[in-house]
Image (spheres, grey):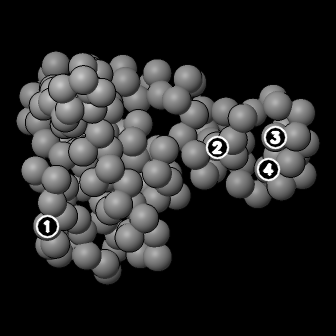
Amino acid sequence: QMTFGFSRDDMASFMPTYLAAGIIEKDPFQVLDRHGVGQLIAAAVTKGRNANGNLKIGICGEHGGDPSSIEFCHEQGLNYVSCSPFRVPIARLAAAQARVATETKTDTTTGPQQTTPTTTTTKGPVVASGKGALSAEVSSGELQKGTAA
């Protein structure tokens, strides 16, 4: 939202018009813009990890509970997403799906094959957590419960 310079206070007056006219595909307060903001995230991850290979990177807010945003964060190598507690179950499922999609590629002739991600330099799985809620780390296709981050 700040990349666009939008204020949450003012957006109600113009966002429905922008969405209806196709100026913006999805509400940037809910879904991460992969083409614009995504380029900034990709650059930040690359530069941050070049400076510190163990750097933990994540996002928080409503994007942390949006399945398509979580998938994008996984593809970019983020370590965690954080969202409000009521969105944690969806975030955990989306993180698991992103992990499984990266690890398993179905070939119609030979069946599932193990692959490595081509668009990520992640050192670990995306973790979905919410303040006061359980966090979930997706590892080897299983959800593991832990305390909130």
The residues bearing labels 1 and 3 have C-alpha atoms spaced at a distance of: 38 Å
Q: Is residue 141 left or right of residue 101?
A: left
- Residue annotated with mark 1: 144
When the figure is inspected, residue 99 is found, relative to residue 46, above or below; the finding is: below
| Residue 64 appears in view | yes
Say few, some or many: other residues with alpha carbon within 10 Å of mark 3 (under 14 / 14 to 19 / 20 or more). Answer: few
Among numbered discs 3 and 4, the one appearing first in the sequence: 4
Residue topped by disc 3? 19
87 in relation to 133, above or below: above
Query: Between tags 3 and 2, which lies in front?
Result: 3
As measured in the structure, the alpha-carbon distance from the residue carrying label 4 to the one carrying label 1 is 38 Å
Q: Residue at x 27, y 32 (%)?
A: 106
Give the residue type at disc 1. Answer: Gln
Residue placed under numbered mark 4 in the picture: 11
> How crowded is the residue under tag 2: few (<14 C-alpha within 10 Å), some, or many (20+)?
some
Q: Residues within 10 Å of mark 4 (few under 14, many from 20)?
A: some
